[in-house]
Structures are given as structure tokens and as C-alpha cells.
């Protein structure tokens, strides 16, 4: 059965992030259910790239995020962001 | 050059057959649930995905052709977007043309969903204009533009609800009459009434670009009558050569005839073997080469093959014959060769073949390789890719019960939030 619904691509998924002394991610613990990473796997952050902040959509559901571009061990290029409203960390493709 | 092709048949009296939003109607015929929801087709050729044809319900919600997907979804969150299938629309349109050709030999396709039928001399066969129009509508209803789901109601399944027919002298009068007809109805402009009929029509029925339309409005010229009342030279001085054509159309001073296409003569290609051939694989190869050669014949352009015949001259003065009528006319080598190969396997020649001849004996208008809708080579390549995808989807659906194939479309490519930039839409060719 065809749905004709739009499905968002690159939806972020929640991760647990270990922060270093400077408040930047040093390791990422992914959810066991997510297929992109191995189950209950901890990956260290090899390098941190750009850091930026987005504050948007204040007129409906406000978005306040701090983004960190990172290279994980093994060379995977990801974007991590902290939801500044809830303190949760999320990961997605750049 | 073929004499019959250099002088195609013409007709001064025209019937315009118009199915607005033809492509969308074809989709509704395939998926009847679309008819009750706001829907839109994505543009087939645009590099950035924009909306192409919009259903009345979606239009009511503010969606317009040319909008980006994000604009359209923003205005109408329930909008159902469909990937276009140009090959399917062309196929359907070709069937419509074939149905019209059963009423009159003079049929001129103008664009997808719009065709003219020449009716000069048909009065003796059918009667007056009303009877000819009725004959056309009957043929359209019988032509097989029907959904596989017999209970489905759609514009194509029930052509009376979508097709508008206009009758008049020359293509322009017929076209304007069709635009004035109610859905499923006909509007007849009897001989001698063209001037009166045209005078009250809005200038928008002329082939105007938006700028010219705006200028005519600024000049206070809102109807063809007002335009025709001005001196021809005044319009020419303002709008040049295009203005002359508009003035003449508005005044009923020109009546473009319907120009039909002559059916091509049979096309044949033959091969004489150096030594008689009995090997079946060799014969299949020869058959394919001959079909390719016949398909490349200039007379075949714009036509699909409906009936094909293969003849073989055998040793000891014997012969072999295989003929096939294709259910779906085609310009594809493999499609045409398939029934002949089957025949070759089931009832091979009784002796070695000295000479092999392939003949295309009947044709249907249009091609899947798209003479009408998608004219260029890249469009033909896209159609071929789509066919390959369709067969892949059929296989996946057989195994997994769902197509499981998606198409990536841009939604808000400029968004700072990565998850807002692209989306997946079900792909079902």
C-alpha cells in the first residue's frame, strides 16, 4: 500500500556523550537499537571541527542547539548537537 | 520521400478534444483514492523538485503549479505528492489518439491531453456535428482508458466527467469552444457563428505570454471582440508579428486546418545468408538485427509497431512464417522480437533458412520512447531507466509485498537543520 507520505531523511538519534574539560565531546555512546553503530558501542571522538549554535523558530517550538562537527574513531564524520532546552545530545550526518 | 507523408490529410472543420490535467487524471485512474484527496504531480524534468499538475482540491488549498515541494506542503499538509510517469501518460495519450483515429483519419496531437480531429466529410457517415461529437465520445469511452479496478471511478474511467469537446471551423475556434464546454460536455460553434462566438471570449484564450496579457489588460482589451475592433495595423505596431496573429485569430480571419498524419506503409528488412542457416541461435540473432534495422527506418518515427511478421525462405523452395499482433504496441526491439522468438522455438523452420525477412505491417501512434511528451534522447533514456526500475519494483513487491523503494526529494535544502533538507517519498513507477 502506497502512503505518499514524506519521510524526513537524516533524522537525528539520541546518544550519550561524554564531555571533556572544555565541554566538548570526547566519546559517544550510541543506543543499542540503532543500526548505524554497533550495539552499546562507545566511540571516542578523534577530532572536533566546527562548532556553531542555532536559535530558531522562537514563534512556535523554539529550537536552541549547540552543534559540534566531529570525526569518530574509524573516521566516521558526524554532527553532534546538544539540545540546550533539555540537555540531551543527538547525532546525525553532516 | 514518401508521397503520402509529404501531403498529410487536412481538415478545415476541427473538433478539439481536451482532457485538462491529463497526467493527473491518469494517476487517479491508477489509484482512485487520489481523486478524493488533494494531490499533485512533481515536475518530470526540473532539477529542483517543483509541483507540476495540481488537483482541484489542492488548488483550493492554495497549491499552484511551479511551487516548491516545501511551499506546497506548507500550504496543504495533507497533500499527496506523486512521482510523474511520462511513459505511462504518453501510452495513455497514444491510446486516446488511436481511438480518435477510428472516427476520422485526420487526427493531430497538440500536447498531452489535447488533440484535434478533422471532421470534413464525416457528415455522410455520422450526421450533423452533434452526432459526430457523440461518435467521438463513444470511441473514447471504448478505447480502453480504463482502470484495472473495475469499480474505480475516475476521470479516465469515466471520460464523460473529464473530457471537454469543442467543435468549430479551424483549430482555434474548436479550442476556444472546448474551453467553454462543461466537463464531460461539448460546445458546438456552428458555421457562420464564429465571429459572434469569439467576440465575447476573453483575450486569455489567445496564445499569449504573461507580459502580453498584462499589456492587453492595461490597454483595456479584455475580449477578443474589443481586440478585433481595432485596426489590424495598430495591434501589429504594438505587438509585432505575434500581434498580427492574435488579431487574425480574434477576428476569425484565420482558421488553421487540422493536419493529420498519414499511416506509414509497411516497413521491411531482409537478410540473405551466404550459406543456409539452421542454427536457432543464429536465426534469433538475425531476427533481432532485422528488427533493429526496421525500427531505424525514417517512416517508423513517431509510430509504434502494432503487428510484425517474419518470413523465411527455406531450402528446397519451402517457406516459414510467423506473425504477431502486439497487445501493447512498442518500439522496443526485445518487446517486438519476443513473440517471434517464441514461435521460432515452438515451430521452427523445417529446413535451413536462405533468406529472412521482417515486416512491420501495422502501427499505432506515439511511442513509449516518447515522440509526444518527452521528445529528446535524454527523456527516452529516462523512460528506459523507469522501465527497468518498474520491473525491479515488481520483483521486490513479489518477494516483500511492498515496493520498499523511495525517492529522495528536496524539501528545504537551504535549512540550517539537516533533517529538514531532504525527505523520502514512496517510489512506485
Image: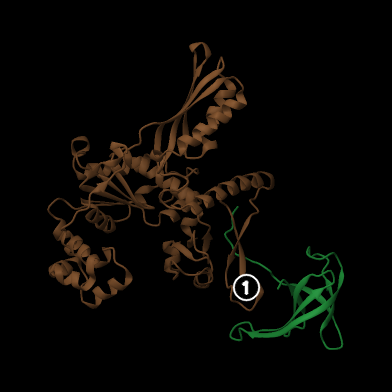
Residue A3 image point, x, y percent: 59, 58
Q: Colour of chain B?
A: brown
Q: Is residue B202 visible?
A: no
Circle 1 — which element? helix
Q: Which residue is mark 1?
A: B420
Residue at 77% over, 80% down: A88
Asked if one can make out residue B245 in the rendered structure from this viewpoint, the answer is yes
B22 sits to left or right of B8: right
* The colour assigned to chain A within the rendered structure: green
Single out the residue that lies furthest toward the bottom.
Answer: A22
Decide: is A61 above or below B185: below
Image mark 1: chain: B
Circle 1 Cα neighbour tier, 10 Å, few/some/many (<14 / 14–19 / ≥20): some
Between B71 and B378, the one nearer to me in the picture:
B378
Residue A17 drawn at (x, y percent): 83, 78
Give the image location of residue B410, x and y in percent: 58, 68
Amino acid at each position: 500500500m502506497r502512503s505518499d507520505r514524506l519521510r524526513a531523511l537524516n533524522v537525528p538519534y539520541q546518544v550519550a556523550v561524554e564531555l571533556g574539560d572544555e565541554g566538548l565531546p570526547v566519546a559517544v555512546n550510541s543506543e543499542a537499537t540503532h543500526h548505524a553503530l554497533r550495539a552499546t558501542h562507545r566511540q571516542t571522538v578523534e577530532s572536533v571541527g566546527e562548532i556553531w549554535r542555532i536559535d530558531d523558530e522562537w514563534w512556535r517550538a523554539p529550537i536552541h542547539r549547540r552543534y559540534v562537527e566531529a570525526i569518530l574513531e574509524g573516521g566516521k564524520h558526524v554532527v553532534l548537537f546538544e539540545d540546550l532546552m533539555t540537555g540531551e545530545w543527538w547525532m546525525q550526518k553532516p | 520521400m514518401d508521397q503520402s507523408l509529404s501531403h498529410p490529410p487536412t481538415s478545415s472543420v476541427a473538433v478539439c478534444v481536451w482532457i485538462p490535467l491529463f497526467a493527473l487524471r491518469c494517476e487517479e485512474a491508477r489509484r482512485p483514492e487520489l481523486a478524493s484527496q488533494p494531490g499533485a504531480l512533481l515536475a518530470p524534468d526540473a532539477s529542483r523538485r517543483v509541483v507540476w499538475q495540481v488537483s482541484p482540491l489542492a488548488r483550493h488549498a492554495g497549491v499552484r503549479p511551479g511551487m516548491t515541494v516545501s511551499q506546497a506542503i506548507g500550504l496543504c499538509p495533507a497533500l499527496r505528492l506523486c512521482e510523474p510517469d511520462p511513459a505511462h501518460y504518453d501510452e495513455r495519450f497514444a491510446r486516446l489518439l488511436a481511438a480518435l483515429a477510428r472516427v476520422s483519419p485526420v487526427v493531430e496531437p497538440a500536447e498531452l491531453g489535447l488533440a484535434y480531429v478533422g471532421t470534413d466529410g464525416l457528415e455522410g457517415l455520422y450526421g450533423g456535428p452533434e452526432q459526430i461529437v457523440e461518435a467521438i465520445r463513444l470511441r473514447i469511452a471504448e478505447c480502453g482508458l480504463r482502470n484495472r479496478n473495475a469499480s474505480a471511478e475516475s476521470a479516465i474511467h469515466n471520460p464523460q466527467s473529464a473530457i471537454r469537446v469543442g467543435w468549430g471551423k479551424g483549430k482555434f475556434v474548436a479550442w476556444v469552444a472546448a474551453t467553454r464546454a462543461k466537463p464531460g460536455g461539448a460546445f458546438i460553434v456552428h458555421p457562420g457563428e464564429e465571429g459572434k462566438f469569439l467576440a465575447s471570449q476573453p483575450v486569455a484564450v489567445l496564445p499569449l505570454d504573461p507580459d502580453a496579457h498584462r499589456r492587453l489588460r492595461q490597454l483595456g482589451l479584455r475580449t477578443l471582440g474589443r481586440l478585433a475592433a481595432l485596426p489590424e495595423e495598430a495591434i501589429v505596431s504594438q505587438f509585432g508579428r505575434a500581434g498580427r496573429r492574435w488579431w487574425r485569430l480574434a477576428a476569425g480571419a484565420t482558421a488553421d486546418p487540422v493536419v493529420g498524419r498519414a499511416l506509414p506503409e509497411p516497413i521491411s528488412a531482409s537478410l540473405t545468408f551466404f550459406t543456409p542457416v539452421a542454427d536457432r541461435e543464429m536465426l534469433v540473432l538475425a531476427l533481432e538485427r532485422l528488427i533493429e534495422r526496421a525500427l531505424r527506418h525514417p517512416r517508423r518515427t513517431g509510430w509504434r509497431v502494432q503487428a510484425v511478421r517474419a518470413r523465411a525462405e527455406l531450402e528446397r523452395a519451402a517457406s516459414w512464417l510467423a506473425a504477431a499482433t502486439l497487445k501493447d504496441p512498442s518500439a522496443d526491439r526485445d518487446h517486438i522480437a519476443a513473440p517471434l522468438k517464441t514461435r521460432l522455438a515452438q515451430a521452427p523452420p523445417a529446413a535451413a533458412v536462405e533468406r529472412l525477412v521482417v515486416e512491420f505491417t501495422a502501427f499505432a501512434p506515439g511511442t513509449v520512447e516518447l515522440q509526444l511528451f518527452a521528445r529528446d534522447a535524454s527523456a527516452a533514456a529516462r523512460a528506459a531507466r523507469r522501465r527497468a526500475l518498474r520491473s525491479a519494483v515488481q520483483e521486490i513487491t513479489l518477494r516483500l509485498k511492498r515496493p520498499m523503494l523511495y525517492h529522495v526529494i528536496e524539501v528545504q535544502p537551504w535549512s540550517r537543520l539537516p533533517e529538514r533538507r531532504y525527505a523520502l517519498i514512496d517510489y512506485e513507477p
